[in-house]
Amino acid sequence: QVQLVESGGGLVQAGDSLRLSCAASGRTFSSNYMAWFRQAPGKEREFVGAINWRGGTTYYADSVKGRFTISRDNAKNAVYLQMNSLKPEDTAIYYCAADRGLGITYVYRRSGYGYWGPGTQVTVSS
């Protein structure tokens, strides 16, 4: 089992920055990828970005590319999401997720992740 807890959400204005953190515990060595997803009211949960625990390779959704950056601290078992130039459409609950070991083919897919945090709310006002 892998336990995940997000933190760092809040209310900001358009153009501001915010940094989310995800603390992982448990059998973290069983996961190769950590990801961030988000879910806005009335919408499906969507992929934001992911990072490979070992090599540090990152993957991003087109909607956040160039504005969001994922990083990790292996010693702390933590993953971060730096969000810059925030827009009102970034408003959502942001979830941290750990993969099920299915490989890179599933890195962008919700079905590839078997462990989820409770989420943290990010609200961007215009």
Image (cartoon, rainbow, N blue to C red):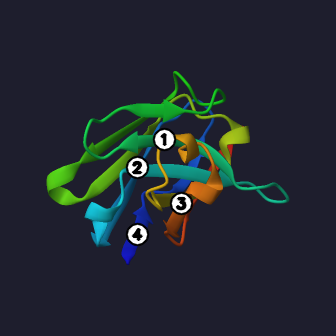
Residue occupying image coordinates x 52% and y 26%: 67
- CA separation, marks 4 and 3? 12 Å
Q: CA distance from mark 4 to mark 2?
A: 13 Å
Q: Distance from label 3 to label 2 (Cα)?
A: 9 Å
Q: Is residue 76 left or right of residue 120?
A: left
**Which residue does the numbered mark 1 point to in the structure image?**
104
Q: Is residue 2 visible in this depiction of the protein?
A: yes
Q: Earlier in the sequence, mark 1 or mark 2?
A: 2
Could you tell me the amino acid type at mark 3? Tyr
- Residue positioned most to the top: 66
Taking the image as shown, residue 67 lies to the left or right of residue 109, namely: left
Residue topped by disc 3? 113
Determine the secondary structure under disc 2.
strand
Describe the element under mark 3 as helix, strand or loop: strand
Q: Secondary structure at mark 4?
A: strand
Residue at label 2?
33
* 66 vs 22: above or below: above
Q: Which mark is residue 4?
A: 4
Q: Nearer the viewer, residue 92 or 88?
A: 92
Residue placed furthest toward the left = 75
Q: How many marks?
A: 4
**As shown in the figure, which amino acid type bears the numbered disc 1?**
Ile
The percent position of residue 89, horizontal first and vertical second, equals 73, 39
